[in-house]
Image (cartoon, grey):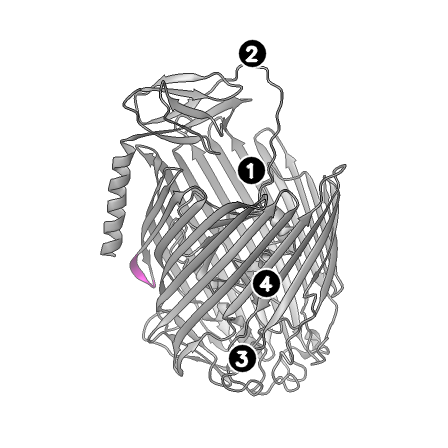
Amino acid sequence: MKKFILITLSILTVSFINAQKTVSGTILYKLNEDDYPLEGASIYWLNTDKGTITNFSGDFTIEKSEESDLLVISYIGFLSDTLKLKSSSIVHFLKPDENNSLDEVTVQKKRKTIQKSYLAAQNIIKVSSEELLKAACCNLSESFETNPTIDVNFSDALTGTKQIKMLGLESPYMMISEENIPMIRGASQAYGLTFIPGTWIESIQITKGAGSIVNGFESISGQINTELKKPFTDLPLFINLFGSQMGRLEANVHINRKLSNRLSTGAYIHLNNNDERMDQNQDSFLDRPLSNQINIMNRWQYTNLEKGLVSFFTWRYMQDQKQMGVLDFDPLTHAGLNIFWGSEIKTNRLDLSFKTGYVFPETPYQSFGFQSAFSTHDQDSYYGLRIYDIYHESLYNNLIFNSIIGNTINKFKVGVNFSYDRYIETVDNFNYNRIDKSIGTFFEYVYNNDSDISFSGGIRFDNHNRIGNFITPRIHFRYTPKENFVLRISSGSGRKISNIFAENQKMFGTNRTINIIQKEFGVYGLDPEVAWNYGLSIIRSYRFLGGDLELVADYYITDFKNQIIVDWEESNKISFYNLDGKSISKSLQLGMDFSYREFLTLSAAYKNYIIRSNYNSGYLYKPLQPRNIVFINAGLESSIKNKSQWKWDLTINLIGDQRLVETIRDYENKTSPKYNLINSQITRVFSNKFEIYLGAENIGNYKQINPIISSENPFSPNFDSAQIYAPIFGRMIYSGLRLKL
């Protein structure tokens, strides 16, 4: 901690000294009373060769000159201005040149659907809505199939739910937020990703490693933030229909209306249903659950750019039901009996959120932001003869102030957030009820000269009724020694309370006994999880064979100071206990992205994971975690003719072997076989209003053999549906249409 504070103070001092030698500012213009940034405006000192240009936000930084104190600002089509500066920071508006008449020149370059930041200190990958259209991403858990940053696999053999991992660690170790409000946490950890429809998502921002401290202290391996469609900019009417040969049917409808120049509202409806009983592997169990979900959202957006005010109010209600088990199971007749093994999960969820932002009109670099969210998550479920019910009530508030120190090179955020969580939890005949409350304050400083150096350092102090008082530091540094070459390093800590039952619901699909090795204090008698994350990232881009080539190397280490060990090593038992010894995760990713003109994209990545922990039985590799993964994606797009176009996408994942825990099916030290998964989709765009798509997942039809242990005797101690390393159902063919009006 002392080293972290000294490094932060040193960088702040250097940044302050540099700030005295530079001038920074923002160049804007007005159109219909609204302010817009001017990208590419020329900034230079009069009668010198010292100059720069503004970036996409209209921001610039230029070193002061001893030869001149007159700054010239020019842009084609606007009147040039010459300013005698009295401060080191300016905001200036250029006026259009009414007498300037030039022939129109259009320069086009297609924006990548997955973009890596070259300017931010943090390692951020932005995934656009166009990328999500390349696969059947009916919900958030399926939105990462074409992205090598996130690993997607099945959690168990009953629910068909896909879980995601970053840096080899499960989703509870990430902070998953919705428009920067923590969303997938607590009771929603197991299935919450399936509660966010893919068509509602505008973009996804993925931050690898220690992220920002602004939204909380829980992030350990990274952050995923989803931005939802905005009523002000979304289509007036959007319809998406989806169906697969396995009986999965989905419908999405968006309806948006502008009630005035400042007020817009949108209604979003998502329905999905699967009532087809399938048993391809002949084990008498459903391969996919019978399910239905209704998900309704209503958003209100108020925008007043003259006063610098933007506000959103959103409410959402979701009802989700799943039925699993043997083909002959009837809940009305067999629930609670040991005749046929069956399971039901019924979830009702309500979300309310309000967020507002205010930008000071005279000082656009200064703003306030306030976020507030309330949710209730009510899940009633049983697995055979086992009961698991959880009710989670959550409140989150966050207040942020943004400003600068001297000029726009030096920015900071300061604020406070408060969270309240009430849990009512029943596991078989035991109740685990609690209330968690925390209040924290934070400060984050950002230095960015938009050229070779950027730095982000944050620290927060929190008081938690169960964890106590603690400090969370995080630091990110970017250095660009030459054009198109970026080097990043990062470090930071995170901690979380492990909701051991909600996060590991697949254990209820077994007859293992639950064993909690408790201490005197802590939730479930277990201490909170604490870890440090260290990262190194390198990006280098080139012009290659007439296209753009980008090479990436990432290496991250997550070092747990305490971790809740989920121990499946003993047959017929699952144990939870605090780490006694060492637990470390090492993640290496080497990647390549190539795009040629407007029609070809290629992406490939190799990922290697070394994840080991001290179990009671020894220092072991994490089970059900591939050591090696190879990812390949290719996309083709035809030229647009009469607004019509063809699009094709192919994704291949080569999955390495995985360690299996010993069971009556799997002997000691057994590993899973290597396999590959191939997905593809083709889209025909008929116009900018109508398109259809056809795709297939798991084209090679690879399936795990005998996925459910002791399926013929599900009430025996050996029954286990949790040891899943591959798909349990085969090839899925789907099709759909999109209507945009």
**Residue located at (55% from left, 82% from top):** 511
Q: Is residue 710 magenta?
A: no
Q: Is residue 284 left or right of residue 40?
A: right
Q: Secondary structure at mark 1?
A: strand
Does the residue at mark 4 contact the one at mark 3 (Cβ under 8 Å)?
no
- The residue singled out by tag 3 in the image is 671
Query: Which quadrant would residue 326 be assigned to in this image?
Result: bottom right
Residue that badge 1 annotates: 301
The residue singled out by tag 2 in the image is 99
**Which of the two labelled residues, at mark 4 and mark 1, occupies the earlier sequence position?**
1
What residue would you read off at disc 4? 347
Q: Amino acid at mark 1?
A: Gln
Secondary element under disc 4, as helix, strand or loop, is: strand
In the rendered structure, which segment of residues is drawn in magenta?
A: 466-471
Q: Are the two marked residues, 3 and 2, in contact with CB atoms closer than 8 angstroms?
A: no
The first of marks 3 and 1 along the sequence is: 1
Question: Percent x, y for residue 425?
Answer: 48, 69
**Label 3, label 1: how many angstroms apart (C-alpha)?**
52 Å
Residue 382 in picture, x, y percent from top left: 59, 74
> Is disc 2 placed on a helix, strand or loop?
loop
The residue type indicated by label 3 comes to Thr
- What amino acid is labelled 4 in the image? Thr
Q: Residue at x 59, y 83 (%)?
A: 719
Is tag 4's residue or tag 3's residue first in the polypeptide sequence? Answer: 4
Q: Main secondary structure of the magenta part?
A: strand
Q: Which dot, 1 or 2, sits closer to the camera?
A: 2
